[in-house]
Amino acid sequence: MYKHRRMLIIISISVILFVLFLGWLKRPKPVDVILASVEQGEVQRTVTNTRAGTLKACRRAGLSPAIGGQIARLPVREGDKVTKGQVLLEIWNDDLVAQVALAKSEILSSQSRVKEACVIARVAKREAGRLTKLQKKGLAADERVEQVVGEAQAKQAACQAAKSLTEVSRSRLAVAKAALDRTQLKAPFDGTVAEVTGELGEFVTPSPVGVLTLPAVDIIDNSCLYVLAPIDEVDAPEIKTGMPARISLDAYTKKFFKGKVRRIAPYVLDREKQARTVDIEVNFILEESALNMLPGYSADVEIIINSHSNVVRIPTESLLEGQKVFIYDADNKTIYKKQVTIGLSNWKYTEILKGLKKGEQVVTSIDRDGVIDGALVRLESK
């Protein structure tokens, strides 16, 4: 009897232990979560570009000669610094150089003829004046005086004609110089040669009407850069020139530059299979920030529409649909869902108007399996 009772007790204890073991095996396992503290700080409402923007030079010129011909001089290479007015490329122009020299010679010849004609005119004028005085005293015949006065007037006219011919020669020189200038490409501003599409001896031709061809020399002014970026048409009405912005570039990771909206395109781009966008231009507030940057870098902009300082905020990644968050209960090592009221929001922070206070902790890893209301959790460091 005693042995039978002892066996029942052992069996009962074994069953209880087995049930407890099964319960322990089936217990809910804690979910690893990442937390962030509710804090006070600044929250800004921003608008960002829909596609990557591009860093552009304020001045860039693709230059081609006005006339076709063979390249005779190419004094610059890609990467060279050039100054305004410097010759970048010259087409063979020996004939035009000769015409300029000829026009200069004609001017010198004309000036000599002017000097000769005008000296003769002055002598004739003095002689006419002398005879006129003698005529008044009755010492010179009228016919002779009229003849001398007429000759003086003719010689004076010849002087004026010689002067006019000199002006014609100067105009001819200007025409020759203009034709010569058409054979030269000159830098329209200080800058850097970005590309040269030609070699000595090659022939270049100007672009025909309606046909786009590569420029002979591409010059960029790197001293002034801005970002051109597309903004969704829905966000465009809120953007105004002069609004502050943040600029980020892939080439400068984790670094932001202060900017300002300088221009908003007056039309909407409708590109096939793409959202309709409006191009905006953003300047660097500190121009020295753009030193050593290269036009063509990909860039993003955040335009600051509104800003609230010293407000309660949480990471935007912790916000659930319906304006809810998961709050961490440190005593029970669990999380629970809570309704909040939000204000301004951006990709990083969201303003909390109601429902949370500074110091509470919210779950930021809300997309993990098992993160549900009442779940047992285990903290994971970021």
Image: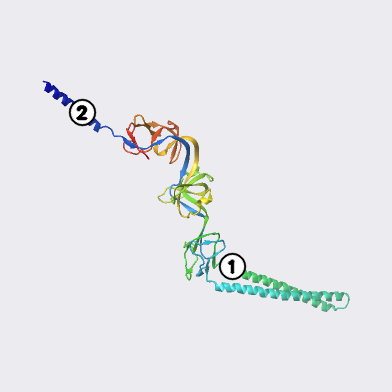
Number of callouts: 2
Q: Is any atom of residue 5 visible in this view?
A: yes
Of residues 376 and 197, the one nearer the viewer is 376
Pointers 2 and 1 in contact (CB under 8 A)? no
x and y percent of residue 218 in the render? 49, 61
Q: Which mark is residue 178?
A: 1
Can you say which quadrant of the picture contains the N terminus? top left
> Residue drawn 62% across and 73% down?
103
Q: In what element is the residue under mark 2? A: helix
Secondary structure of residue under mark 1: helix
Estimate how packed mark 2 is, as few (under 14), some (14 to 19) or many (20 or more) residues with alpha carbons within 10 Å.
Answer: few
| Residue visible at 70% across and 75% down in the picture | 113
Check disc 2 and report the residue beneath it. 17
Which quarter of the rendered picture does the C terminus lie within? top left
Please name whichever residue, 327 or 63, is drawn nearer the observer in this view of the structure.
Answer: 327
Residue 154 located left or right of residue 221: right
Amino acid type for the residue under numbered disc 1: Ala
Asked if residue 363 is positioned above or below residue 155 in the image, the reply reads above
Residue 85, x across and y down, in percent: 57, 63
Point out residue 68 in the picture as x, y percentages from the top left corner.
Answer: 51, 68
The residue type indicated by label 2 comes to Leu
